[in-house]
Structures are given as structure tokens and as C-alpha cells.
Image (spheres, coloured by chain):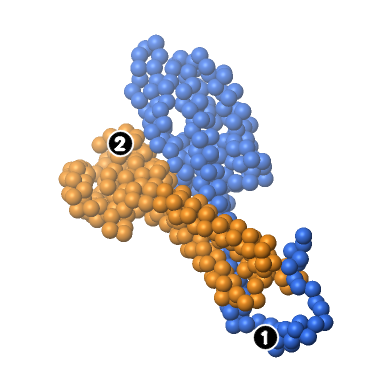
Amino acid sequence: MRNAWRVFAFDIAAPLAAIAALLTIGYALDWRVWWVAVCSVLCTLIVEGMIANFVLFRRDSVTVGTDDDGPGLRLAVVGLSTAALVAAVLVTYTQWTESDRDLARNMDDVVQIAVKFAESTMTYSPPEPTTAIDRAAAMMEPEQAEKFKASYGTEAKNQAAQNISAQAQTISAGVNAVSPDSAVVVVVVGATRQQPGKPPERAVVGLQVVLSHESGQWRVFDLIPISPAPSQ
Amino acid sequence: MSTLAFVPEETDSPENEDAQAADDRRPVFSGLGIASAVLGLLCVAAIVLTSIIWSTHRDERDELDHQSRAMQVALNWAGVLINMNKDNIEASVQKLHEGTVGTLNTDLDQVIEPFTNLVKTLQLRTTGQVNAVAIESVHRDPNREPGSAPPDETVGGLASRTDTVLIIATLTAENAGGKRPPSSLNLRIGVSDVDGQLLVSGLDLLR
């Protein structure tokens, strides 16, 4: 009975576990070419080892698992299997768990940034004509921020100079596309525009906010109105 | 031959008795044996961890697949809605009906009345183009009473879940009088999972 367990554990389970671990690593790495090469070599060596073990068993009636004089070899077999399995844990964790978490975090982050950006872009008032625009520009890289302020900031100043104010609130938003270094968020904003002596005008505007991942943080790259902008 | 065939048979010869005595003196678990056992436990732990990681990853992937399918269902449904014209209105409404569930199914005619009325009265031929689509993750309803109950995501217990898809489309309409200026449509479409089938359960026109 003791020998049967040793045969199962050291001669069968350990090499098969190592092969399974190597295949799992390959799957997690989407079978990158270099790993296909490494995995092929390692799996061939393991299978060769199993065949050699079987041949020696036929000749000497003893295997790696049952050889009382070879505990070091058994430890080496288990050690290699353990190394392969631990490597599989590390690779699957980084390739799957971390990337899933990054994706979820990125989706949350880009939506929050895009919502704040879109609302700030369409908010101005006579006492604070460009405060919200400046807040939005702070979410961009300097080069894009200058262009943005030149366009939207000037328009907000002109509107505020005519005593016109606007307030925007997000109605709905979601991620259109996301990758580790760029994202597009769709935002539908309800904007209310007030002009002295006139009833408030309300418009619903669809926007696409394009973001890029720069220096470890998400920055707004561009704002693309999808719906016709409210008449000004 | 069984796996135990190589175990030497016990005999009563003096050499075997010596060997037996030597075996009895040898500890049951050597240092290397204990190290192997520890590594074996580590192997089992690694297999369990890999299984958990794989299972969690598969759940995440299934979730993304489900959202992707929900977006496709919403896109197809919205495609019929925004491409209705005087010639295919009956067939379009029938197709929309077939893809809905819950109160939207019973109230569909009323909900899409703004579209059908426009097409019927002005004899319009509309062409819709979807500009952007997303699974909604932020929704603020300015008309919702604070503290009021959230929308029923189970559609009266029929659905296991409901995803909301945000679609922004441009609608171009023309009739005998000529082409009308394009207008924008912002739609929130609820897609519910009813026994594995994805059906549209809600339509909000954001305006």
C-alpha cells in the first residue's frame, strides 16, 4: 500500500502536475511564442523522464517513487513540480487576477473623471466664468489644456459676459472602450442655461470623453460632442 | 502485473532478517521525506490557488461576455427602432414587440408612440446611425424622488439581472417634402436576462 502511494505521488502525480502547470502558464500567457518553445522542451523532458522511469521499473523493479536509496531524487521531483505549480500561481495571478482588477479599477476611474470633466466643461456663471473650465483643464495634459481653454474657456467667458450662466449635471455615463493606456467614455449631460429675463433652457448633450493613461494616471485627451450642442 | 509486483516477498532467511532489522531502525520519515511532504502540501495549495484564480477570472470574463451580448441585443433593438419608416412600420413594431419583456412588452405601443406617430403622420423614412454605445455605470435621474425605491432589476421576478445600455444615435428623416435636419437620440435601454434569453425590458429617451 505504501509503495502504491509512492508510485502515485512521485511517479505519476508529480510529473503530470508539472505538465499541467506548464500548460496553464501557456494558457495564461496566451501561448506566446517563446513560451511555446520553452514549454515544449520542458514537457518533452518530463515525458522522457517518465518513460525512463518506466523502463527502469521494468528492468530493476524499482521506480523513483519506491527507491528507498533515492530520497534526494524524490525531493528533486517534488521540488520541480512545486516550482512549476508556484510559477503557475504567480503567472495566473499577474495575468488574470491583476489584469481583471486593473480593468475594473480603470473602468471606475475613467467614468468618474469623464463625468467630472463633462460637467465642468458645460458649467459657467458670470461671477466665475472659467473656474469650472480651469478645473476641467487641470484634468488634461498641459498641451491639450491650453487648446481646451482657448476654445471652451473663451466661449464661457463670452457667455458669462452676457450674464448667461449654465449648469450641467450628468444623466448617464458608461465606458465605450477601454484598454490599459486609453479609454473612451460616453457621457450624457443635462445642461440648464439661464439668461436674465428669459425662461431657463434645457438641453441634453451626448459627449465622448477620450482619456489616456499618462505617468500612472488617467488624463483627459479630448472631448468630442456627439449630440448637437445647445444653442448659445 | 499489479503496481505492487516489485515489492520483494518476505522470507525468513538470515540476510532478510538483518535487512528487516536495519529497516526497523531507519526512521519512518527521513528529513528529505519530510521536505518532500512539505513540498507536496505546497503543491496542493498551489493547485487550489490556481483553481480559485481561474474560477474568479472566468466569472469576470463571463460578466464581460454578458455585457457584450447585452450591448449587441440593445444595438439590434435600437437599430429597428431608429430605422422605422412608413413602409415597414408594422413589421418593425412587431419585431420590437418580440424582443421585449415585462411592462415594456405590454406598454410598447405607448412607449414608442413618439416614434410611430412621427413616422405615420409625416410619412417619414428614417435612417438611424448609432454613434456610441456603452454599458451604463453612472445614472442620475433628476426626476427621481429622494428615498424612492430603485428600479426593479428583476422585471417582476422574471429576470435574473438587468443591464442598462446607453446608446447615442443620430436620426436622419426625410419625406416627400425633403430631408429634415439630423437629430440626436440618447437612449437608455434596459436588457434583462430571462432564463438565459436577453430581452429588452426598458426604454428611456433622455431629453
Q: Which mark is residue B175?
A: none
- For this orientation, the residue located farthest to the front is B14
User: How dense is the environment of label 2, judged by Cα within 10 Å: few (below 14), some, or many (20 and up)?
Assistant: few
Which chain shows up in blue?
B
Q: Nearer the viewer, mark 1 or mark 2?
A: 1
Residue assigned mark 2: A229
Task: Give the percent coordinates (x, y) of residue B34.
Answer: 61, 79
Task: Give the percent coordinates (x, y) of residue A17.
Answer: 59, 61
For chain A, the rendered hue is orange
Front in this rendered view, residue A103 or A109:
A103
Front in this rendered view, residue A36 or A88:
A36
- For this orientation, the residue located farthest to the right is B12
Left or right: where B17 falls relative to B180: right
Instruction: State whether residue B68 is above or below residue B16.
Output: above
Residue assigned mark 1: B27
For mark 2, name the chain: A
Instruction: State whether residue A75 is above or below residue A152.
Output: below
